[in-house]
């Protein structure tokens, strides 16, 4: 192992997004809070979920998870494609860093950014509603695993894409729709049967539902099932990342 | 003695294109080695294979005895590569970049004095806290060299490091590379400036179409019988019109009152040529011979490609 090398690559990735924090941390935080403001103003008087939870409170965990998902993906994918396109990936490929160290550094940095934004939204969200945590460990577990899953998707997309346009395609036609249709804004019990079944094919649904269980002690499906789906998703994505990184897919010729 | 870099039977193909076809090279420790060849000859592919950026389809590369695939960590620790392109990370300052690059090699703050020395030697001191985006091309080139040397590698590979660099910077870079060589570093250089290779390299390999077509000391390559230029400067009231028939095959240039002939060192006699010119009534007022330089050798060896 090259622990200092791993730490340095992780540190470099954190320093990279910290230097443009307005774009990478503040902007997604503000955007999510705007969602919260608009939806809570428009719907909180009319909708209760799970019988007794007001809509603003119900919405907040979903929005936190949606931000975690989108920012974990954005961090690793944009960093890798920028490095590929500008050619500075060279500086990472030439030193004695293993494919595992490469993976862990990009993964952990993307997770950190996603979790910082998630925590920021939770804290600022307290100004809008008092969201209490029923199971703190479950909240942390789902946040960590979900950010790991999407950071891995970001690594795969960053390796695969040859231009920003392709990465934008993954972001806009895969990540964004799946996160919006995962139950962020509603409980799937309010959907017709067909759409309830369709939602269960969406892995993001399990991330949000399990995460929400950690806050409310209530969920659309068994939280153990969400956990199993999530852990299998993370395992598959990590395996895929490590396999491709070991082969040097689109990084080494 | 164990070579600095040992390349054995390296093949690389991209689809049907054979980029490298069985390269064997042994570069000694402390040697200043030149790798020359026309565009597309396979130089950069070979350098990328040495650095681990490209994987060979067949064959092995060892850096100071460490296989660069099976013992890649050790091999890469001993190798510093200055890339051909001016690549940089736009998020960081010069000092940050060097500290980060140092960290990738497992080095921490104990390496800061060496980073300071590199910054001073490469005249980057007043730019140490400047973002890479704000640097000129020449400054970026210096940072690339500092990055390649940040972990004190024994073997330094320079892939056309002076491409697009102004004369002053080129000279200062070569002074610095000479100093590295004198300090015991093994230098592997590719360049399009053949006069530089001639002046700097102790031994040269010429690649063409993925094969080593010549491997010799620089002196040995220059001594090869590849021709000698005889330039005759004559006075005439009018430009030289008719060239003697027996010399026509030798004429490479005839402009105004200057006649340039390309002689084969073994089969053409300088005296016979001068006699033939005089026989045409041309008065020779000056005569100069030029030995073949590396460019002539290079052109001769890669002639098939140009034809």
Image (cartoon, rainbow, N blue to C red):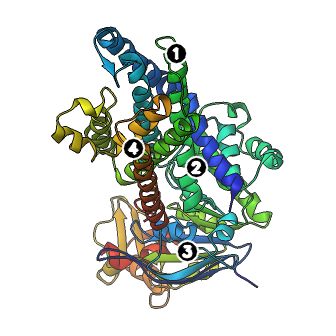
Badge nearest the viewer, 3 or 4: 4
Identify the residue under disc 1. A126
Disc 3 target residue: B291
Question: Can marks 3 and 4 be said to lie on one chain?
Answer: no
Disc number at residue A178?
none
Q: CA distance from mark 3 to mark 4?
A: 87 Å
* Disc number lying in front (4 or 2): 4
Q: Is residue B138 above or below residue B50?
A: above
- Give the total of numbered labels: 4
Picture coordinates of residue B194, whole percent (x, y): 53, 65
The answer for how far apart the CA atoms under marks 4 and 1 are is 27 Å
Residue at the bottom extreme, as displayed? B267
Q: Which residue is mark 2?
A: A105
Which mark is nearer the camera, 3 or 2? 2
Label 4 marks a residue whose chain is A
Camera-nearest residue between B239 and A152: A152
Depth-wise, is mark 4 or mark 1 nearer the camera? 4
* Contact (Cβ within 8 Å) of mark 3 with mark 1: no
Q: Which of the marked residues, 4 or 2, is nearer the chain's N terminus?
A: 2
Marks 4 and 2 close (CB-CB < 8 Å): no
Residue tagged 4: A222
Tell me the distance, in whole angstroms, between the alpha carbons under discs 4 and 2: 33 Å
The picture quadrant where one finds residue A194 is: top left
The residue that appears at 27% across and 48% down in the rendered structure is A201
Label 4 crowd bin: few (<14), some (14–19), many (20+), radius 10 Å: few
Q: Real-space Cα distance between discs 3 and 1?
A: 84 Å
Quarter of the N terminus of chain A within the rendering: bottom right
Helix, strand, or loop for circle 1? loop
Q: Nearer the viewer, mark 2 or mark 1?
A: 1
Residues A246 and A108: in front is A108
Chain identity of mark 1: A
């Amino acid at each position: 192992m090259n622990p200092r090398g791993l730490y340095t690559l992780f540190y470099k990735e954190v320093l990279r997004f910290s230097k443009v924090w307005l774009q990478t941390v503040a902007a997604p935080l503000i955007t999510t809070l705007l969602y919260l403001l608009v939806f809570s103003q428009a719907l909180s008087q009319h909708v209760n979920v799970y019988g007794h939870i007001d809509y603003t409170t119900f919405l907040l965990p979903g929005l936190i998870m949606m931000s975690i998902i989108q920012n974990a993906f954005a961090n690793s994918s944009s960093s890798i494609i920028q490095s590929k396109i500008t050619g500075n990936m060279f500086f990472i490929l030439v030193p004695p860093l293993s494919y595992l160290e490469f993976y862990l550094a990009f993964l952990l940095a993307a997770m950190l950014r996603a979790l910082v934004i998630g925590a920021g939204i939770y804290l600022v969200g307290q100004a809008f509603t008092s969201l209490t945590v029923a199971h703190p460990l479950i909240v942390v577990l789902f946040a960590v695993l979900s950010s790991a899953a999407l950071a891995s998707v970001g690594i795969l997309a960053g390796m695969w894409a040859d231009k920003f346009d392709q990465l934008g395609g993954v972001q806009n036609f895969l990540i964004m729709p799946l996160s919006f249709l995962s139950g962020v804004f509603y409980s799937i019990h309010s959907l017709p049967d067909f759409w309830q079944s369709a939602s269960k094919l969406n892995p993001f649904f399990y991330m949000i539902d399990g995460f929400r269980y950690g806050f409310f002690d209530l969920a659309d499906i068994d939280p153990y099932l969400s956990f199993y789906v999530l852990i299998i998703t993370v395992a598959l994505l990590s395996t895929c990342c490590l396999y491709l990184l070991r082969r040097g897919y689109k990084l080494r010729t | 003695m164990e070579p600095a870099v040992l390349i054995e039977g390296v093949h690389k193909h991209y689809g049907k294109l054979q980029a490298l076809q069985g390269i064997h090279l042994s570069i000694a420790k402390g040697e200043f080695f030149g790798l020359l060849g026309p565009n597309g000859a396979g130089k950069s592919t070979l350098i990328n294979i040495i650095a681990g950026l490209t994987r060979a389809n067949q064959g092995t590369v060892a850096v100071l005895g460490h296989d660069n695939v099976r013992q890649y960590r050790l091999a890469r620790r001993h190798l510093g590569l200055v890339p051909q392109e001016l690549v940089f990370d736009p998020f960081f300052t010069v000092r940050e970049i060097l500290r980060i690059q140092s960290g990738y090699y497992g080095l921490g703050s104990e390496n800061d004095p060496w980073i300071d020395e590199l910054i001073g030697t490469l005249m980057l001191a007043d730019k140490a806290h400047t973002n890479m985006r704000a640097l000129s091309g020449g400054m970026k080139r210096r940072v690339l060299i500092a990055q390649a040397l940040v972990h004190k590698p024994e073997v330094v590979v320079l892939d056309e490091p002076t491409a697009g660099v102004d004369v002053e910077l080129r000279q200062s870079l070569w002074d610095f590379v000479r100093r590295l060589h004198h300090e015991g570093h093994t230098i592997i250089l590719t360049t399009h400036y053949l006069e530089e290779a001639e002046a700097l390299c102790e031994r040269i390999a010429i690649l063409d179409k993925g094969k080593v077509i010549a491997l010799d000391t620089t002196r040995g390559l220059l001594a090869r019988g590849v021709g000698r230029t005889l330039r005759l400067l004559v006075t005439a009231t009018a430009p030289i019109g008719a060239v003697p028939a027996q010399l026509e095959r030798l004429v490479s240039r005839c402009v105004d009152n200057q006649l340039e002939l390309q002689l084969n060192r073994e089969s053409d006699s300088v005296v016979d040529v001068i006699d033939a010119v005089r026989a045409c009534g041309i008065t020779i007022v000056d005569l100069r011979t030029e030995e073949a330089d590396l460019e002539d050798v290079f052109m001769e060896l890669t002639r098939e490609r140009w034809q």
